[in-house]
Image (tube, rainbow, N blue to C red):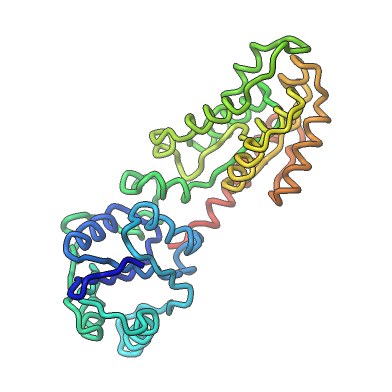
């Protein structure tokens, strides 16, 4: 904790950020111009969102590292304007602060009046009538796509259902990804390795392929903010760094610790993982490596990394419909208003 001067202005704000939007940004920016140190208590609110509290608190920590964030896992989940609830909230905040002196209670809500009196602090109200910014978390939860421009990319990525289709690079995989994104009316990231691997058509390549380079280019491709911001509730990814790691093992016959670590970190970011086993894939065709060998490594790594997945079965239409149905169910489960 930063050591504060004796007469430092210390602000306190209570937040749900379900989700974080530019209204919250305006509140924090304004508060930070007024106080020397700002404390943000983030409430757990399972009745409003499935995004875990630690993820939401992480948004503030990443966007505002100067703000002291306290995760309120045990915070009261009652917010009615009654004397009983007010006392409950006051007692909770007293327990969180443990005697720390607050000079400014920061909010854009009605409870600023009673909480500031309880803390003997200035009631620092910011845009309570929403004249400055006419946006709310309720509006965003009702239509994420419509109000996406009010959400930072770092937040939006956590709100979208992230879907990845794994398997050896193949034209069928790319067609599945494009068709799924078309039916869901959203964006997709194609597999950048398809074109690269298609050009290396020797059964025994004379040099090792640089899968680290492919993985790094994949990360750059997937940081495209416009594609993310124009996504509609879900976003579809073709392949992943996990496949780059596996192909390094199969094509180069080489274990790469850096790729392994990158793969483990990246694969955990997806909400839904699908595996498409296409025997006519580029690796089997161009490098003479059996698809079974690739799949065994893929399944083994998914099990080791404890990543649940769905193996796509049937014809093209059945595979596409399996993905679409599961994505819609996931999106519906996240809609809490």
Q: Quadrant of residue 119?
A: bottom left
Residue at image coords 67%, 25%: 169
Q: Position of residue 311 (x, y in %)?
A: 74, 40
Return the residue nearer the eye: 310 or 211: 211
Q: Is residue 160 above or below residue 89?
A: above
**The N terminus lies in quadrant:** bottom left
Image-based side of 139 in relation to 119, left or right:
right
Image-based side of 330 in relation to 55, left or right:
right
Q: Position of residue 265 (x, y in %)?
A: 59, 45
Q: Position of residue 148 (x, y in %)?
A: 36, 45
**The C terminus lies in quadrant:** bottom left
Q: Is residue 164 above or below residue 326?
A: above
Count of numbered badges drawn on the protein = 0
Q: Position of residue 168 (x, y in %)?
A: 71, 28
Return the residue nearer the eye: 248 or 151: 248
Residue at image coords 73%, 38%: 312
Q: Is residue 26 above or below residue 285?
A: below
Residue at image coords 50%, 62%: 52
Q: Quadrant of residue 224?
A: top left
Residue at image coords 35%, 52%: 63
Q: Is residue 20 above or below residue 69?
A: above
Return the residue nearer the eye: 75 or 110: 75
Image-based side of 283 in relation to 94, left or right:
right
């Amino acid at each position: 904790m930063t050591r504060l001067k004796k007469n430092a202005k210390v602000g306190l704000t209570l937040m749900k950020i379900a989700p974080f939007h530019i209204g919250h940004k305006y509140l924090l920016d304004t508060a930070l111009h007024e106080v020397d140190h700002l404390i943000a208590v983030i409430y757990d609110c399972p009745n409003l969102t499935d995004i875990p509290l630690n993820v939401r608190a992480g948004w503030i920590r990443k966007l505002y590292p100067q703000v002291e964030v306290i995760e309120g896992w045990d915070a009261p989940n009652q917010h009615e304007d009654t004397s009983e609830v007010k006392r409950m909230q006051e007692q909770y905040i007293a327990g969180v602060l443990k005697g720390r002196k607050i000079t400014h209670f920061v909010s854009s809500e009605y409870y600023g009046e009673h909480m500031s009196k309880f803390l003997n602090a200035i009631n620092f109200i910011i845009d309570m009538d929403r004249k400055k910014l006419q946006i709310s978390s309720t509006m965003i939860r009702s239509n994420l796509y419509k109000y996406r421009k009010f959400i930072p990319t770092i937040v939006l990525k956590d709100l979208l259902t992230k879907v990845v289709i794994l398997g050896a690079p193949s034209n069928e995989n790319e067609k599945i990804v494009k068709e799924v994104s078309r039916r869901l009316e959203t964006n997709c990231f194609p597999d950048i390795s398809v074109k690269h691997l298609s050009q290396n058509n020797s059964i025994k390549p004379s040099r090792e392929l640089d899968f680290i380079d492919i993985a790094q280019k994949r990360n750059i491709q997937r940081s495209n903010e416009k594609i993310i911001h124009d996504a509609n509730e879900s976003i579809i990814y073709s392949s992943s760094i996990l496949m780059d790691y596996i192909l390094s093992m199969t094509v180069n016959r080489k274990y790469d610790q850096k790729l392994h670590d990158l793969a483990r970190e990246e694969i955990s970011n997806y909400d839904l993982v699908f595996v498409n086993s296409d025997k006519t894939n580029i690796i089997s065709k161009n490098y003479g490596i059996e698809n079974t060998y690739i799949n065994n490594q893929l399944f083994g790594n998914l099990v080791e990394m404890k990543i649940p997945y769905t193996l796509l079965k049937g014809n093209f239409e059945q595979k596409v419909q399996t993905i679409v149905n599961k994505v819609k169910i996931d999106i519906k489960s996240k809609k809490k208003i």
